[in-house]
């Protein structure tokens, strides 16, 4: 017999011994000893076995400020990227002169940060929620929101998009109009290959059609129509919004549209709104079938973000 065969035989024998021992203990020895009162006697003599102390989960706090607002975020709320400080890109290697995350203070300006919380209880990752987090992409898994918060700068880009208005009023109308205009003016690329031209096919005559007010969500919406809109494509998105597309839009949604061959694929919506108190914009994705709950999501996400303000620093700035 070869060495590998002998090793396999030893493993099989050990497993068989373990199974037989477990069966004898649980099926014969333990019930018999329990009937004799052995376990009760041992408890009377030696007392209850010691219980392991479970240490309280206490994640470190990360500090920064967003447009001058001091924030203190427990690290288990932060996603992998965490806080992006203005003096250090989140994607670049940290230089020796750059402070470590636990060395940061409220004096450090942050450009952005991202959070991971479970909907609807808005709890972060922890030993109790770890299993829920790792199965979030399963068709029947819990909904986890990856929330991005970005500080808005005061400037205009080519006179087309006003970040100043976005910061002051939470106006997404310029962004919404821009998507519709680019859709009408350009061609859309599909995943279908054109053998004659040696490139992916282009689709023309695609446009957005206004659909009015959606009775379930109370939102205005527009749908892409034309060739290819029955398929799942990056450009194929149904738009929802609250407000006037020619005036002020406070809430803006881009929802995936089109069919997919994978029955477990979950269509999502990307939701954007603004927190004027901080001069920050917020964006996160959620399953499209939860769009009817957008109001509750907004309230919960706003409360979570605004609750990250450091209470000590905030009190010192008060009267």
Image: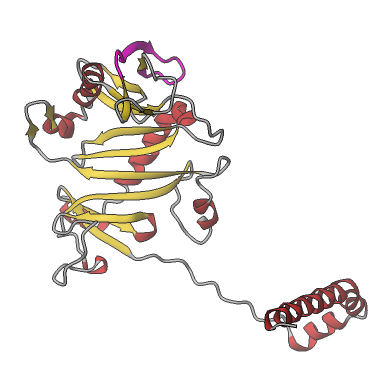
Q: Between residues 67 and 285, which one lies in front from this camera angle?
A: 285
Q: Residue furthest bottom?
A: 45
Q: Quadrant of the N terminus?
A: bottom right
Residue depicted at x 16% and y 34%: 167
- In the depicted structure, whether residue 193 falls above or below residue 217: below
Residue depicted at x 22% and y 54%: 84
Residue 315 visible in the snapshot:
no
The colour scheme used to paint the residues is secondary structure
Residue 85 screen position, x and y as percent = 19, 56
Q: Between residues 5 and 11, which one lies in front from this camera angle?
A: 5
- In the depicted structure, whether residue 216 falls above or below residue 18: above
23 relative position to 243: left or right: right
Residue 227 visible in the snapshot:
yes
Residue depicted at x 68% and y 83%: 3
Count how many numbered circles sit on residues in the image.
Answer: 0
Residue 100 screen position, x and y as percent = 23, 68
Residue 86 screen position, x and y as percent = 15, 54
126 relative position to 96: left or right: right
- Image quadrant where residue 281 sits: top left
Q: Is residue 213 magenta?
A: yes
Q: Between residues 177 and 243, which one lies in front from this camera angle?
A: 177
Residue 250 screen position, x and y as percent = 26, 26
- Image quadrant where residue 80 sits: bottom left
10 relative position to 65: left or right: right
Residue depicted at x 20% and y 63%: 105
Q: Is residue 151 magenta?
A: no
Q: Please provide the residue range marked out in magenta.
A: 203-220
């Amino acid at each position: 017999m070869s060495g590998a065969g002998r090793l396999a035989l030893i493993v099989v024998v050990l497993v068989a011994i373990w199974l037989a021992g477990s069966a004898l203990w649980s099926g014969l020895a333990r019930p018999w000893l329990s009937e004799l009162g052995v376990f009760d006697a041992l408890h009377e003599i030696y007392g209850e076995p010691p219980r392991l102390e479970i240490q309280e989960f206490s994640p470190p706090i990360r500090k920064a400020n967003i447009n001058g607002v001091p924030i203190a975020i427990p690290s288990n709320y932060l996603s992998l990227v965490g806080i992006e400080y203005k003096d250090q890109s989140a994607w670049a290697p940290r230089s020796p002169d750059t402070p470590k995350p636990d060395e940061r203070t409220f004096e450090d300006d942050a450009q952005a940060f991202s959070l991971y919380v479970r909907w609807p209880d808005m709890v972060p990752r922890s030993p109790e929620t770890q299993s829920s987090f790792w199965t979030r992409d399963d068709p029947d898994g819990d909904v986890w929101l990856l929330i991005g918060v970005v500080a808005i700068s005061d400037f205009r880009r080519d006179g087309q998009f006003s970040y100043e208005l976005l910061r002051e009023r939470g106006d997404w109308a310029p962004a919404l109009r821009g998507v519709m205009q680019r859709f009408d003016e350009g061609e859309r690329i599909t995943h279908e290959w054109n053998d004659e031209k040696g490139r992916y096919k282009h689709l023309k005559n695609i446009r957005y059609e206004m659909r009015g007010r959606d009775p379930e969500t109370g939102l205005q919406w527009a749908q892409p129509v034309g060739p290819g809109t029955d398929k799942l494509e990056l450009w194929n998105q149904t738009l929802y919004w609250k407000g006037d597309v020619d005036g002020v839009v406070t809430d803006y949604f881009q929802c995936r549209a089109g069919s997919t061959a994978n029955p477990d694929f979950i269509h999502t919506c990307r939701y954007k709104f603004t927190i004027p108190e901080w001069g920050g914009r917020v964006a996160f994705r959620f399953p499209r079938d939860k769009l009817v709950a957008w109001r509750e999501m907004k309230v919960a996400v706003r409360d979570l973000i605004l609750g990250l303000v450091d209470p000590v620093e905030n009190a010192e700035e008060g009267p």
